[in-house]
Amino acid sequence: MRFNKSKVAVGFIVTGALTVVFGAVLLFVGPKVMKDQIIKNTVIDPNNELTYTMWKDVPVPFYMSVYFYNVLNPMEILKGEKPMVEQRGPYVYRKRIQKDNITFHENFTVSYREYRSYYFEPSMSVGTESDVVTIPNMLVLGAAVMMENLPYAVRLMISATFKTFKEGPFLTKTVGELMWGYDSGLVDFLNKYLPGMLPSSGKFGLFAEFNNSNTGLFNIFTGKDNIRNVHKVDSWNGLTELSYWRTPQCNKINGTAGQMWPPFMTKETTLPFYSPDACRSLELVYQRPGVMKGIPLYRYVAPKTMFANGTDYEPNEGFCPCRQSGLLNVSSCRQNSPVFISHPHFFNADPVLLDYVHGLSPNEEEHGLFIDIHPQTGVPLNVSIRLQLNLYMKKVSGITETGKISEVIMPMLWFEESGYIDGPILTTFHTNLVILPAVMEFMQYGFIAMGLATIIIASLLHRRFRKPREDVWISTVLHNPGATDKELVNGSHDPAEKKGDMGKSEK
């Protein structure tokens, strides 16, 4: 059987063309397949082993680092001098987060309560919970501001009550007591005769109400009907809007619950979320792209307008009464206590706040909050939420404990809640969302390149194989103008040969 090289070359050309077509089809179909796979894996569904597990029980270490502002000159503050503070810490606590009472509903939502608990980590801390620090006494200085408009006689009675229970304007306690609660006759008295005045009915501590508690009843969208809605809050404690603030816009419950966001983010996308601790919705904005252990990410940060006052940023007028920009007045959701939230060290705040207190030095690296997020899935890779707790204090006549304190926003502590994906979860995440898409993209262009190369090489070979036959055909036509087409094709074109054959036949 004769081996026709020219036909083989044609076969390779056809194969190359089919390979190019296949690669082109993958070019259009591949992204859709990946998109469908991402949608399937980001919907809140118990069948999604990776993302559902990450949502239900956060599988990565999460920590809260607390820094206290130790007051160095309490007696001088009472005489009207500027406060001097030094930062102490961090005191680090491992935070455990777990969702419970998870219930799926027919309107494509799921409700749950998220419980949190904290465990001290000595190896990660600078100091122990036995360290002693001095901070303003919120029960005295906060109550003084709350009562300043009451009749003078009532203020005198309040001051007498403080003296009865030996409560002074500053507290010197251990870190553990300040965090989780300490024994106080005044606290017991208030809980008995004025129930509801304090945020906690037990011991009074700055984080007492956070430990072994839940953040309320969240109802969020699963994304099954529309992936753009996944993780967005439908209601919180049965509410679709709040009543703490002065305008409907400020009372809106916007965004997600703050753990994941809808997939397919762009640089124009923002990160809105509702924070029960801040009593409002917050929104982060895109800052820059980045990479974490091979995984592409977008970094989102707090805009300067987040805690701006109504004068500097009109939409925030509803959060007032306001003071300087950089402070959020949360008294309306904290039993009217004069408490303000800000960024640590008054980062991104009005510089005048730094003039009232000695010992602060803000910078973005240490005090700015951020979330690094994988834009294709909406899953956070690295999180650092940093906030500061401040007390507004001043001299109040009739309450002698306030002395001659100058009007000041006094920083008490700041904390950072942080965590990042690592270990097996990161490996799985990297494999499914980085390597596989890269392999598919390589295959798309690889098939096209391989097909084109096959076509080019096979075409060159086909031309080479055909050239000798074309030369023979041309020679035959020139030397044997009387040859038939069949003779030209078969190559039998020698007249002498033909004549010899005839002579043999006659013989």
Image (cartoon, rainbow, N blue to C red):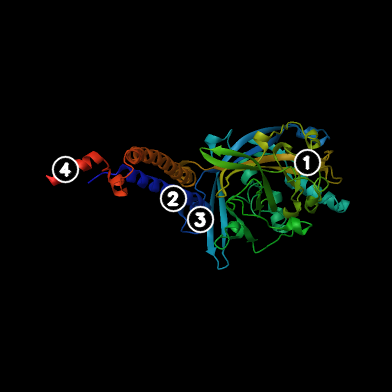
Per the model, the C-alpha gap separating discs 1 and 4 is 127 Å
Q: Which residue is mark 3?
A: 36
Q: Quadrant of the C terminus?
A: top left
Q: Which residue is mark 4?
A: 503
Q: For marks 2 and 4, give the one nearer the viewer.
A: 4
Q: Which residue is mark 2?
A: 22
In three-dimensional space, the C-alpha distance between marks 1 and 3, rounded to whole angstroms, equals: 51 Å
Q: Between 320 and 481, which is closer to the camera in this rendering?
A: 481
Whichever of callouts 2 and 1 sits on the residue coming sooner in the sequence is: 2
Q: Earlier in the sequence, mark 3 or mark 2?
A: 2
Which of the labelled discs sits on residue 409, or is there none?
Answer: 1
Residue sitting nearer the eye, 183 or 276: 276
Left or right, 454 with reference to 82: left
Distance from the alpha carbon under mark 3 to that under mark 2: 20 Å
* For residue 448, side relative to residue 189 (left or right): left
Name the mark nearer the viewer: 4 or 3: 4
Q: Residue at x 35, y 47 (%)?
A: 11
Three-letter code for the amino acid on which mark 3 is drawn:
Asp
Q: Quadrant of residue 241?
A: bottom right
Q: Position of residue 394 (x, y in %)?
A: 82, 42
Q: Secondary structure at mark 1?
A: strand
- Disc 1 residue type (three-letter): Ile
